[in-house]
Image: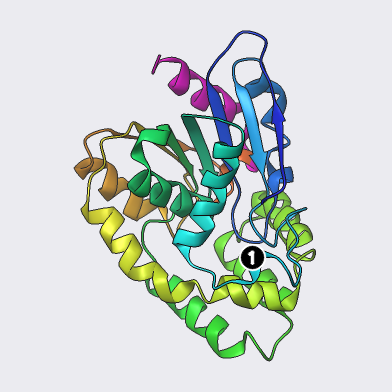
């Protein structure tokens, strides 16, 4: 089972589950914890191979990595904690897992908050992925990760986000990085399905105005998905919760509070 930490609220029965992206860990939510604990029960988890969810030879994590199997890891945790329903907040690749969970288990999802959401890989993104496929077994993965992080978060004000993700990525093993990278073979048809099919679950996309790779697609998705809203944070890149935590926290807590 995934490593996780929970924080219980004295009176609220609502849960918020935070899902980080590839190469990160639950520590990326450190700027959210204090504010969200005031309103909700909190579940922080480390995806397989990340943070303290380290695989071993006897571990089920050694099975094939798919978006469905990684999604089921999350469901296993909420089942174990008898959490019937939760709001889910994700960043980057974590948003893909949340949307996949909502497709498979819609009755478990109260709402989705998608930070730095990925809904389409544009030409530049696809070139990056192809380079990764070519070099993933040759070049030390951390070199690739640093390169990807710089392309996705190029500006000076993105430096903290880049540094945080590279620092967390260093805790991965090369084999683990390759396992996760193989998920890219699944990603295009999955994202095409997500863009095409609306879902009857309240969804807030919260994006940086400088998230050049992914914001244009989200703007189109929100126009066609009835229960979706978009909040754009100015002077902010891909990792909105780290770069602009006060704005992020205020917008998300306000959104979740108004769903009650």
Location of residue 173 (image quadrant):
bottom right
**Mark 1: few, some, or many residues within 10 Å (few <14, many ≥20)?**
some
- The quadrant of the picture occupied by the C terminus is top left
Location of residue 169 (image quadrant):
bottom right
> Residue 13, how many percent across, how many down?
54, 16
Q: Nearer the viewer, residue 173 or 238?
A: 173
> Residue 9, how many percent across, how many down?
66, 15
Q: Secondary structure at mark 1?
A: helix
Answer above or below: position of 211 versus 176. Answer: above
> Residue 184, how many percent across, how many down?
47, 73
Residue shown at 60%/38% (left/top)?
80
Whether residue 12 is in magenta: the answer is no
Residue shown at 31%/68% (left/top)?
189
Q: Is residue 240 among what the camera can see?
A: yes
Whether residue 255 is in magenta: the answer is yes
Q: Nearer the viewer, residue 124 or 99?
A: 99
Apparent side of residue 214 relative to residue 72 in the rendered image (left or right): left
Apparent side of residue 185 relative to residue 169 in the rendered image (left or right): left
Residue shown at 27%/59% (left/top)?
193
Apparent side of residue 42 relative to residue 56 in the rendered image (left or right): left
User: What span is colored magenta in the figure?
Assistant: 242-260
> Can you name the residue that lies furthest to the top here?
11
Answer above or below: position of 32 versus 211. Answer: above
Location of residue 50 (image quadrant):
bottom right
Instruction: Examine the residues drawn in magenta and state their main secondary structure.
Output: helix
Identify residue for label 1: 61
């Amino acid at each position: 089972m995934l490593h996780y930490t929970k924080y219980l609220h004295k009176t609220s029965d609502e849960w918020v589950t935070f899902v980080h992206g590839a190469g990160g860990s639950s520590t990326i939510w450190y700027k959210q914890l204090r504010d969200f604990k005031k309103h909700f029960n909190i579940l922080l988890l480390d995806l397989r191979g990340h943070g303290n969810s380290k695989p071993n030879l006897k571990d089920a994590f050694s099975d094939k990595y798919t978006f469905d199997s990684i999604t089921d890891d999350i469901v296993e945790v909420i089942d174990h904690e008898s959490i019937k329903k939760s709001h889910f907040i994700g960043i980057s690749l974590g948003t893909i897992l949340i949307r996949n969970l909502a497709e498979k288990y819609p009755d478990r999802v109260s709402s989705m908050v998608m930070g730095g959401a990925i809904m389409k890989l544009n030409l530049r993104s696809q070139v990056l992925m192809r380079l990764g496929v070519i070099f993933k077994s040759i070049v030390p993965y951390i070199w690739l990760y640093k390169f990807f992080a710089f392309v996705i978060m190029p500006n000076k004000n993105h430096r903290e986000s880049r540094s945080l993700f590279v620092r967390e990525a260093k805790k991965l093993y090369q084999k683990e990085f390759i396992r996760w990278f193989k998920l890219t073979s699944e990603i295009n048809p999955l994202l095409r399905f997500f863009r095409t099919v609306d879902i009857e679950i309240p969804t807030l996309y919260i994006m940086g105005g400088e998230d050049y790779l992914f914001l244009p697609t989200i703007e189109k998705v929100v126009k066609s998905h009835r229960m979706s809203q978009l909040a754009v944070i100015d002077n902010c890149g891909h990792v909105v919760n780290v770069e602009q935590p006060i704005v992020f926290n205020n917008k998300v807590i306000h959104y979740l509070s108004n769903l009650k």
